[in-house]
Image (tube, rainbow, N blue to C red):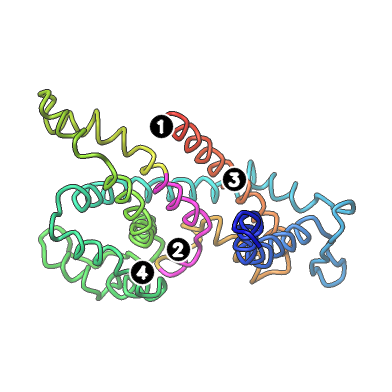
């Protein structure tokens, strides 16, 4: 068989394992969730009855969840989720952009060491890192000890009793490496000659950043934001570990509650679909912007 005839068959064969993986671990489970969301409820035991035929789907669970999300008891949960995720993303930008810029443009020989330190949290289980924060933020933890050693704090701060700032900081801490790495890759690819030309024209360091570096890193910033935002919206274990209070409940906590702790699994499955639809809108915006940037670059 010639090399030309092998080509059309080789690449589809190489993509087959990934396709099977997506079907088995994404498409099938997602369809099962949809079957429950559009299914029925046993009138006696209140347990869900999945409906696998799309022609027989019912929309009571979805409509009920939508009504509660738009104007009912779940509306504050969705608003709170957007506020927490937005604040955590802003914190990631404020911390992650300077770090990524320094490592990509100014670190020199220390770049490898700094990259290793940025990636070091990935070597430790996420839950383990969050539990370390729980120990630090306890009433007798090191954070309160340091604060009480200052003249500004006399009593331990209740960081773990439903404090929204704790949830935001924990989310930002947990996903910060996901933000820094793609942004670093973009900043590292910027041609240094463009920056030198800008400075030679008398624009200055600050002007060069605003007019050259920041526009050229916009796509990387968008990619880093998308990679960070998408898992944040569905996160429930971070809130559970550092707060566990109904006053800080996010959408992920409600999904976990309905699917694992109640018989109303149809509501939980409907919330999964609603959250997935919101994330698909964000993902579509990211893909459109990426496609537009590719056309402009070409």
CA–CA distance between discs 2 and 1? 41 Å
> What is the total number of numbered labels drawn onto the structure image?
4
Q: Residues within 10 Å of mark 1 (few under 14, many from 20)?
A: few
Q: Position of residue 56 (x, y in %)?
A: 89, 54
Q: Is residue 234 magenta?
A: yes
Q: Which of marks 2 and 3 is in front?
A: 3
**Residue farthest along the right direction in this orientation:** 56
Q: Name the residue under label 4.
A: 122
Q: Is mark 3 on a helix, strand or loop?
A: helix
| Residue bearing the label numbered 1 | 297
In space, the residues marked 4 and 1 are separated at their CA atoms by 33 Å
Side of 19 relative to 157 (left or right): right
Q: Is residue 198 magenta?
A: no
At x 73%, y 69%, the residue is: 263
The secondary structure type at the circle numbered 1 is: helix
**Label 2, label 3: how far apart the Cα atoms are:** 23 Å
Q: Which of marks 4 and 3 is nearer the N terminus?
A: 4
Residue 184 horizontal/vertical position (percent): 29, 51
Location of mark 3 (residue): 280
């Amino acid at each position: 068989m010639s090399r030309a005839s092998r080509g059309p068959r080789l690449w589809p064969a190489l993509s087959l394992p990934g396709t099977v993986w997506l079907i088995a671990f994404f498409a099938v489970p997602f369809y099962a969730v949809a079957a429950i969301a559009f299914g029925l409820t046993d009138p006696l035991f209140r347990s869900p009855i999945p409906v696998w035929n799309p022609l027989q789907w019912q929309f009571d669970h979805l409509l009920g969840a939508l009504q509660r999300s738009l104007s009912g008891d779940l509306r504050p949960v969705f608003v709170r989720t957007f506020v927490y995720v937005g604040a955590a993303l802003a914190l990631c930008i404020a911390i992650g952009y300077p770090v990524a810029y320094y490592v990509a443009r100014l670190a020199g020989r220390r770049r490898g060491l700094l990259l290793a330190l940025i990636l070091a949290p990935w070597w430790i289980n996420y839950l383990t890192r969050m539990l370390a924060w729980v120990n630090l933020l306890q009433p007798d933890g090191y954070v309160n000890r340091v604060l009480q050693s200052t003249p500004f704090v006399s009593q331990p701060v209740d960081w773990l009793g439903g404090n929204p700032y704790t949830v935001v900081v924990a989310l930002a801490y947990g996903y910060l490496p996901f933000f820094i790495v793609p942004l670093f890759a973009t900043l590292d690819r910027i041609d240094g000659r463009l920056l030198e030309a800008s400075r030679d024209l008398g624009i200055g360091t600050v002007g060069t950043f605003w007019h050259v570096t920041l526009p050229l890193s916009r796509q990387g910033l968008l990619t880093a934001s998308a990679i960070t935002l998408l898992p944040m919206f569905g996160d429930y274990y971070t809130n559970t570990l550092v707060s566990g209070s109904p006053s800080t409940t996010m959408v992920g906590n409600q999904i976990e509650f309905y699917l694992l702790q109640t018989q109303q699994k149809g509501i939980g499955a409907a919330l999964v679909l609603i959250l997935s639809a919101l994330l698909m809108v964000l993902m579509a915006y990211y893909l459109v912007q990426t496609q537009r940037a590719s056309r402009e670059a070409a």
